[in-house]
């Protein structure tokens, strides 16, 4: 199994999530809402971990169905985990388990 390629793709997915976190942050700043800061913090956290995962490019770029299944499963879990950060950081949902459930649902 090509773990480096799996982590590389997961890193790019986290970077895309960081970019998409900027959209609600910009909207919140336009409407002068304080929740924009939580989206910026979440975006920075996603970008940090995403950049860590893509620093080293994999030598083998082969992907097979097994790696594809792992990438889809991990990306769903990781996107849900990082997607629950704005709820938890803003204390709109004070329990992280409830924030994770809300994001997954």
Image (tube, grey):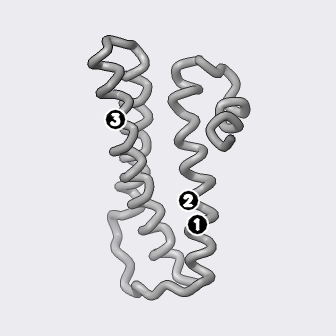
Q: Residue 85: x, y in percent?
A: 54, 33
Q: Determine which residue is flagged by label 3.
A: 23
Q: Residue at x 38, y 47 (%)?
A: 48
Q: Nearer the viewer, residue 43 or 58?
A: 43
The first of marks 2 and 3 along the sequence is 3
> CA gap, disc 2 to disc 3?
20 Å
Q: Write down the quadrant of residue 43 in the picture.
A: top left
Q: Mark 3 and mark 2 in contact (Cβ < 8 Å)?
A: no
Identify residue for label 1.
72
Dot 3, crowdedness within 10 Å: few (<14), some or many (≥20)?
few
Circles 1, 2 touching at the beta carbon (< 8 Å):
yes
Q: Is residue 83 left or right of residue 32?
A: right
Residue 59 in the image, given as x and y percentages of width and height: 37, 84
User: x, y percentage for residue 100?
Assistant: 66, 37
Identify the disc placed on residue 95. Answer: none
- What residue is rendered at 60% in x and 61% in y? 74
CA neighbours of label 1 inside 10 A, class few (<14), some (14 to 19), many (20+): few
Q: Is residue 81 left or right of residue 14?
A: right
Is residue 54 placed above or below 33 in the rendered structure? below
Dot 3 falls on a residue whose secondary structure is helix
**Element type where label 2 sits in the image:** helix
**Distance from Cα at disc 3 to Cα at disc 1:** 24 Å
Q: Which of marks 1 and 3 precedes in the sequence?
A: 3
Image quarter hosting the C terminus:
top right
Q: Badge 2, how many Cα within 10 Å: few under 14, some, many 20+?
A: some
User: Which corner quadrant holds the N terminus?
Assistant: bottom right
Quarter of the rendering containing residue 52:
bottom left
Q: Which residue is mark 2?
A: 75
């Amino acid at each position: 199994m090509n773990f480096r390629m799996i982590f590389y793709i997961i890193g790019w997915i986290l970077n895309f999530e960081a970019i998409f976190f900027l959209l609600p942050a910009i909207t919140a700043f336009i409407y002068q809402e304080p929740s924009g800061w939580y989206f910026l913090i979440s975006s920075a956290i996603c970008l940090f971990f995403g950049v860590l995962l893509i620093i080293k490019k994999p030598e083998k770029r082969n992907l097979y169905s097994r790696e594809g299944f792992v990438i889809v499963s991990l990306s769903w879990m990781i996107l849900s985990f990082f997607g629950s950060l704005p709820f938890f950081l803003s204390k709109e949902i004070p329990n992280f388990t409830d924030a994770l459930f809300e994001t997954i649902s």
